[in-house]
Image: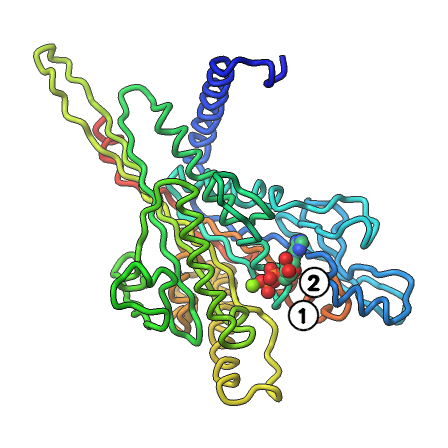
């Protein structure tokens, strides 16, 4: 029977049954996921964007009859990426790579290809859903988008979306889809608890921008006296690592509220961009979601007179860092002067430190003797200091490297692919973050 033929009561019952089934499946998956962890490599995916208007225009002007992507993904999402080079009218293979996933975006009318473009929903399914599964199981997560300016980083992380009216519209990226699914999963958990377990789940949200090696609070408006330009201090916690001191931490109660806050944070970033040309491509942004799950388990006593058994509480805390990096292209020194030069240097500082950190981590992971390990230069930039846990630490981390399909950008594209290839060698040491008092007491 089609859904439209159901009475409202039947429809509600069907929805409840579906939620129960989904919840059951999530519970089973969580059991499996909780046994994972330990040493694991950073997950690396590549996404090629469609040709943009400028590139299509260039091709028209050149009089060439067809446009061809210098990136090929011969296995669809399977992870194989081939980089081509254009010599005159001919294209030849320069290098082949293998990643965890590869996302093709070019439509049939731009270039005929055996694989359909991968949608924002497909990318979320491949990258965002695992993040949520791991977060509920108690693991920390990080997703970061890397690539030259205009390669699709913001499209991938944020996208264009509209959360008004209670539905998620437009072409939402990983962050908005993740928020929606996060709150839907929370609701299912709270509505379908296991026997004898009382659960509370709390979501916290913070957002920063790193610009010129200074950290700014994108939610500055919620703190009296703080402005867009207030420079936040980064301090070091003895076990938790570097953190932004006194950062505004918000407590959204629904996905719509969460997305309104994120939109507000993003607009602080974009407003800044109009003040100085292309500022947004020179800043890094980090949205952090902290998921705290408390489970109280009533342990019943054998004594029939002991009617007030004490609950024991288990707390699981997981963080999700969602990072949109500044453009990775090398700033041409000749063109940069004054303020621009300072920016160029500091952008290079954060991104070049990121490169150094990745290189050092890969070198260490190949060296079995810990005494021979080199020091990782996390402290040389704000970005790497704040992400030190996500790189080589206790976090499930995914890098999405974004590239242009056009031969004009082939050099940058190849550098991005090689860099992403190197990042595959980073080994993280993941564990479930919980204080498992209740489990121990059982
Ligand atoms: P970046 O953040 O890397 O500088 P953007 O995400 O802003 O780049 O992308 C530049 C332009 O290309 C935007 O207009 C964006 O909507 C478009 N774009 C990027 N990736 C895709 C994609 N996979 N599909 C469709 N449009 C895309
Ligand atoms: Mg961007």
Q: Quadrant of the image for the N terminus?
A: top right
Residue picked out by circle 2: 404
Are the residues tagged 1 and 2 within 8 Å (C-beta)? yes
Residue 319 on image: x %, y %: 38, 49
Question: In the rendered image, is residue 376 in sight?
Answer: no
Residue 138 on image: x %, y %: 37, 41
Q: Which residue is at the far front?
A: 165
Apparent side of residue 97 relative to residue 346 in the rendered image (left or right): right
Residue 320 on image: x %, y %: 42, 49
Q: Quadrant of the image for the C terminus?
A: top left
For ligand 1, the image quadrant comes to bottom right
Above or below, 364 relative to 299 = below
Label 2 crowd (10 A; few <14 / some 14-19 / many >=20)? many
| SS assignment at label 2 | loop
Question: In the rendered image, is residue 209 in sight?
Answer: yes
Above or below, 395 relative to 436 = below
Above or below, 194 relative to 175 = above
Above or below, 214 relative to 320 = below
| SS assignment at label 1 | helix
Residue 334 on image: x %, y %: 62, 89
**Dot in front, 1 or 2:** 2
Residue picked out by circle 1: 412
| Residue depicted at x 55% and y 76% | 277
Mark 1 and mark 2 lie on one chain; the one further toward the N terminus is: 2
* Quarter where residue 256 is shown: top left
Label 1 crowd (10 A; few <14 / some 14-19 / many >=20)? some
| Residue depicted at x 72% and y 56% | 50
């Amino acid at each position: 029977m089609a859904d439209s033929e159901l009475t409202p009561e039947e429809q509600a019952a069907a929805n409840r049954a579906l939620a129960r089934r989904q919840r059951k499946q999530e519970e089973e998956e969580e059991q499996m996921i909780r046994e994972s962890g330990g040493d694991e490599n950073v997950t690396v995916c590549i996404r090629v964007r469609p040709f943009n208007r400028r590139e299509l225009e260039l091709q028209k002007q050149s009089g060439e009859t067809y446009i061809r992507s210098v990136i090929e993904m011969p296995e669809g999402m399977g992870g194989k990426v081939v980089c081509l080079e254009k010599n005159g009218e001919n294209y030849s293979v320069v290098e082949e790579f293998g990643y965890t996933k590869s996302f093709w975006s070019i439509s049939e009318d731009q270039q005929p290809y055996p694989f359909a473009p991968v949608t924002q929903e497909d990318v979320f399914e491949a990258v965002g859903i695992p993040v949520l599964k791991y977060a509920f199981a108690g693991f920390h997560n990080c997703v970061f988008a890397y690539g030259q300016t205009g390669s699709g980083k913001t499209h991938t992380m944020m996208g264009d979306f509209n959360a008004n009216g209670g539905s998620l519209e437009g072409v939402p990226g990983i962050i908005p889809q993740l928020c929606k699914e996060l709150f839907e999963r929370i609701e299912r958990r709270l509505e379908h608890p296991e026997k004898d377990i009382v659960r509370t789940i709390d979501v916290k949200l913070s957002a920063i921008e790193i610009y010129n090696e200074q950290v700014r609070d994108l939610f500055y408006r919620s703190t009296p006296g703080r402005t867009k330009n207030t420079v936040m201090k980064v301090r070091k916690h003895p076990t938790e690592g570097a953190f932004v001191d006194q950062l505004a931490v918000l407590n959204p109660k629904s996905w719509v509220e969460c997305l309104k806050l994120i939109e507000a944070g993003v607009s602080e970033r974009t407003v800044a961009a109009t003040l100085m040309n292309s500022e947004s491509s020179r800043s890094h942004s980090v949205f952090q979601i902290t998921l705290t799950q408390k489970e109280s388990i009533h342990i019943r006593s054998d004594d029939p007179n002991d009617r007030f058994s004490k609950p024991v509480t288990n707390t699981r805390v997981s963080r999700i860092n969602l990072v949109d990096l500044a453009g990775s292209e090398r700033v041409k020194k000749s063109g940069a002067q004054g303020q621009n030069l300072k920016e160029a240097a500091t952008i290079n500082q954060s991104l070049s430190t990121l490169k150094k950190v990745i290189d050092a981590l890969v070198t260490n992971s190949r060296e079995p003797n810990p005494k021979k390990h080199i020091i990782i230069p996390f402290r040389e930039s704000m970005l790497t200091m704040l992400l030190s846990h996500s790189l080589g630490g206790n976090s499930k981390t995914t890098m999405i490297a974004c590239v242009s399909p056009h031969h004009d950008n082939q050099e940058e594209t190849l550098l991005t692919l090689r860099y992403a290839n190197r990042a595959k060698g980073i080994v993280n040491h993941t564990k479930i973050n919980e204080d498992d008092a209740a489990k121990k007491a059982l």
